[in-house]
Amino acid sequence: MLKLVQGILEFRKLHLSDYRNRFSHLAMGQKPDSLFITCSDSRVVPNLFTSTHPGHLFVLRNAGNIIPPYHVLCSERASIEFAVSQLPIENIIVCGHSNCGAMQAIMGGTEALPESLQFWLSFGQNPKECPSIESLAKENILKQIEHLKTFPLIKEKYDQGLLKLWGWYFDVGTGDTFAYEEELKSFILIDAVEGEYILARLKNLREKHENLNSHKSP
Ligand SMILES: [Zn+2]
C-alpha cells in the first residue's frame, strides 16, 4: 500500500501534466475497441506490456482469466455484455500467463480449496490432457474463447466477422507475449513479423466496420 500512495504523489509530480488533455477528453466518455480479459495476478500488467493508456482497454480480470459459459449468471457475463453491447468493441483478448496460481490449483486438484474457488475453477480447462502448467494455461485460454462464443451477441458479431477473438499468453519470466494462431494450432511470439501479421488482420477488420458504418449513415 505504501507504494500506492508514494505512486500517487510521484504521478502528480512527474506525469499528470502529460495526461491532462487525455483525461479531460476522456471525461466525456470512453471508446475502447478492445476488451482485455486476463488474470488478477499482480505480475500481469496489460497496460505496461501493450504500451496502452487510459481509454484504450476495457479490462476484466479474475483468477485464471476464466469466463463461465453464457448460462452462468455472474459479474463476468455482465461486464462482457456491457462491453459488447455498449462500447465499440471489435476485439476480445483472453490473456493467460505463465506460473498462473489458478492453473496450479487446477493441476493440483481443487478439493481442499474454499467452495467459491472450487466452483470458479470448475470452468477452467480440464488438466487431464495437459502435461504441464504452461500447456494447461494455454489450453485454458482456448477453452475460455469457446465459452465466449456461447454469448449470443458475441457469436452473432463473430460469425459476421465484426468481432475478433484472440488468445494471448504472457510469459512472466521474459515479458514476451504470444498470440494463438489457429492455422498453426500454436502460440506464436508477437515479434515484428507476427505483429505485422496481426496488424494486417486488424486493418481488414477496421475497414469492414468503416464500410458498415458508411452504409448505416444516410
Ligand atoms: Zn493467473
Image: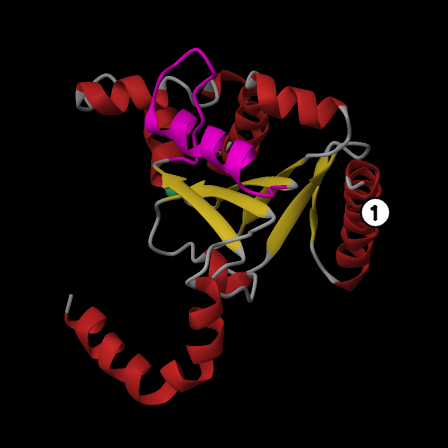
Q: Residues within 10 Å of mark 1 (few under 14, many from 20)?
A: few
Query: In this figure, which colouring scheme has been used for the structure?
Result: secondary structure
**Residue ID for mark 1:** 207
Q: Does residue 52 lie above or below 21 as drawn? A: above
Q: Does residue 35 lie above or below 131 as drawn? A: below
User: Which residue appears at 20% of the width and 24% of the height?
Assistant: 113
Q: Does residue 48 lie above or below 140 as drawn? A: below
Q: Does residue 190 lie above or below 118 as drawn? A: below
Pick the front one: 174 or 120 = 120
User: On the rendered structure, is 190 left or right of 137?
Assistant: right
User: On the rendered structure, is 57 left or right of 181?
Assistant: left
Q: Quadrant of the N terminus?
A: bottom left
Pick the front one: 77 or 181 = 77
Question: How far across and how far down the image is residue 87, in percent?
Answer: 54, 42
Looking at the image, which residue sits at the far top?
A: 71
Inspect the magenta stretch and tell me whether residue 141 lies in it.
no
Magenta stretch, residue numbers: 64-89
Q: Is residue 149 visible?
A: no
Secondary structure at badge 1 equals helix
Inspect the magenta stretch and tell me whether residue 69 lies in it.
yes
User: Which residue appears at 43% of the width and 20% of the height?
Assistant: 68
Question: How far across and how far down the image is residue 112, in percent?
Answer: 19, 20
Q: Quadrant of ligand 1?
A: top left
